[in-house]
Amino acid sequence: MTQTDFGNKYALTALRTQRGKLAGEIADLKTRLKWAEGQLVHVDACLRLMDPETDPTKLPAVRVYRRVKLFRQGELGRMIIDALRRAGKPLGTHQITMALLEAGGHTEAARPSLTPRVRGNLAYLERGGKVTKSGTGKSVLWSLQ
């Protein structure tokens, strides 16, 4: 074996492992899909029994909300207040999110799911009288009450 063959050996092992994981995930999803389709047939049959005029295929699909647990109950609000306290000055939503990513040890990949939660939690804290909002749009600054 040449020196480049050893590099390929590790890459091939990693690729084989990744392929095995993906194949396993696809098999699991197919099993879950088959089960869900079977349940849907039963629900459609019940709908037709109770209301023969109903066409179940015309009913809209409801978007599934997937919760990503980044924080325990109440932890996000406490961390927001702590970030504002440590800053000692009003902060924008982006700055608060950055502080929480650092404090929570989260990577940049958590930002898309964290930012809307920070906004919602800030609104909740504002209604509770714990923080105040000044400005509008992207120039909003949040400070402790």
Image (tube, grey):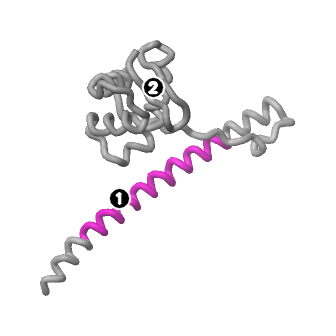
Query: Does the stretch in magenta take in 70?
Result: no
Quadrant of the image for the N terminus? bottom left
Q: Can you tell which quarter of the image residue 118 is in?
A: top left
The numbered dot on residue 143 is none
Q: Which quarter of the rendered picture does the C terminus lie within?
A: top left
* In front of the other: 14 or 111: 111
Let me know if residue 20 is in the magenta part: yes
**Residue positioned most to the bottom:** 2
Q: Mark 2 sits on what residue?
A: 121
What amino acid is at disc 1?
Lys
* Residue 67 vs residue 19, the one in the foreground: 67
Above or below for 134 versus 22: above
x and y, in percent, of residue 47 in the image: 75, 34
Q: Check the image and report above or below for 7 versus 51.
A: below
Q: Pick the residue in front: 37 or 120.
A: 120
Frontmost of labels 1 and 2 is 2
Q: Position of residue 5 (x, y in %)?
A: 18, 82
**Where does label 1 land, which residue?**
21
| Structural crowding at the residue carrying mark 2, measured as other residues with C-alpha within 10 Å and reported as few (<14), some (14–19) or many (≥20) | some
Q: Residue furthest top?
A: 129
What is the magenta segment's predominant secondary structure?
helix
Q: Residue at x 30, y 68 (%)?
A: 16
Q: Quadrant of residue 65?
A: top right
Q: Position of residue 120 (x, y in %)?
A: 49, 28
- SS class of the residue under badge 1? helix
Q: Residue at x 34, y 47 (%)?
A: 108
Mark positioned earlier in the residue sequence (1 or 2): 1
Q: Amino acid at mark 2?
A: Asn
Q: Nearer the viewer, residue 62 or 138?
A: 138
Span shown in magenta: 13-41
Determine the residue positioned at 30% across, 41% down. 106
Q: Position of residue 119 (x, y in %)?
A: 48, 31
